[in-house]
Amino acid sequence: MGGTRVLVAGASIAGPALAHWLRRHGAEVTVVERAPALRPGGQAVDARGVTREVIRRMGLDGAVRAARTETAGAHTVAADGTVLETHRANDHGGDGYIAEIEILRGDLSQVLYEDTRDDVEYVFGDRIAALTQDADGVDVTFAGGDRRRFELVIGADGLHSALRALVFGPHERFVRHLGLVLAFYSVPNDFGLDRWLLEYQDRATGRSALLRPIANATRAMAMFSFPATEFAVDHRDVEAQRRLLRDGVADLGWETPRLLAHLDDAPDFYLDQVAQVVMDRWSSARVALLGDAACSASPMSGQGTGIALVGAYLLAGELAAAGWDPAVGFARCEERMRPFVDANQEIGRMHVESLRAPDPDAGPPPEPDMAALTALVERAINGVELPDYAGVAS
């Protein structure tokens, strides 16, 4: 007799990571991804604190480190290129502004896929069109016409989760726009970039431009952020997104014109709102959400990957420990994850607030409570327990 049948929606990071642990606990796993293949490139993501321990327990520390960007550190610069401040990758034990383990989202996704592809069924170019739950399982209809039954369904399909909208309600109910837009894409490394990230911030307008090294030394990653009170661009309308970026960073200065010259040719352009997902519950009967779909802390938290990998470990472990009872497993996972998520969402909001253009009529900001801030950062990096599920019966 086979194990518990679990359908996972999304093959970026949270989905394949969950598949790894579900298989280790004896489940039969199918991952469905609406894209025709894994998506390359993307933003550089970090593994800090407790997340590194999850990667070690997965047995993937070597593979992840081999694919990291090996960024040495970061320079914040003035418009003329003068270095204003320097941060190194080994600052704060490797958990600082630049993490010791920094890897492109697409490269981490590839590592996780290669780790699971032989034991997990991957279905690309399809998606969940409808589902019906009963006491024993979930009947799923796929957009391609297939119909199948699973004991559990997990949505790991990101900020714009289609499964969340299908089961829990419209995006507007849960997605909180933080007033910032983020865009990034790869460019030829014609900037002399050598393992050091460069960041230019225009404090007067709350905009920034960033250029970071990647594993392929002939290329680099450009990233822009700029304020936007509203965000009404469809996340699949690439031409509208390009126009929004050009309008948003017009006259920004520094290397912006040279970076924008490569915009139309970029094979991996991405733009979206900086947003968080806030939900009272991350599960409904036999369906649950994971990672950004459930509790996005926004890219400005620097911990989206941590929430995904830690959440995958805990969700699979708690389900197995509960004998695959979703009511118990989902609740126990959420209880463990909530304080960790809350701390990271607070970090994300604080980071966005720190980038806002100053109000000329406002007085000087109050001095930060450094003790409270240090405690918050520690909770956001290490503030979750990782039980040992190795002895859990499959």
Image: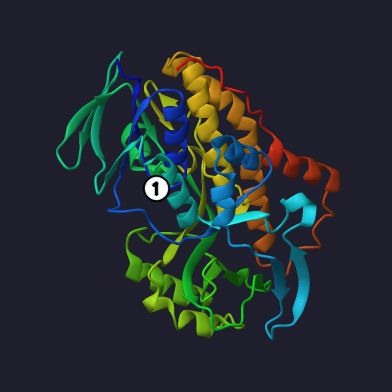
Question: Which residue sits at x=65%, y=44%?
Answer: 346
Q: Can the viewer see residue 378 in this picture?
A: yes
Q: Residue furthest left?
A: 145
Residue nearest the observer in this picture, 217 or 230: 217
162 to 333, vertically: above or below: below
Query: Where, by quadrant of the figure, is residue 385 drawn?
Result: top right
Left or right placement of residue 268 versus residue 34 in this view: right
Q: Secondary structure at mark 1?
A: loop
Q: Can the viewer see residue 45 in this picture?
A: no
344 to 229, vertically: above or below: above
265 to 44, vertically: above or below: below
Few, some or many residues within 10 Å of mark 1 (<14, 14–19, 20+):
some
Q: Position of residue 183 (x, y in %)?
A: 49, 66
Residue bearing the label numbered 1: 160
Q: Position of residue 76 (x, y in %)?
A: 71, 72
Question: Which residue sits at x=62%, y=41%?
Answer: 51
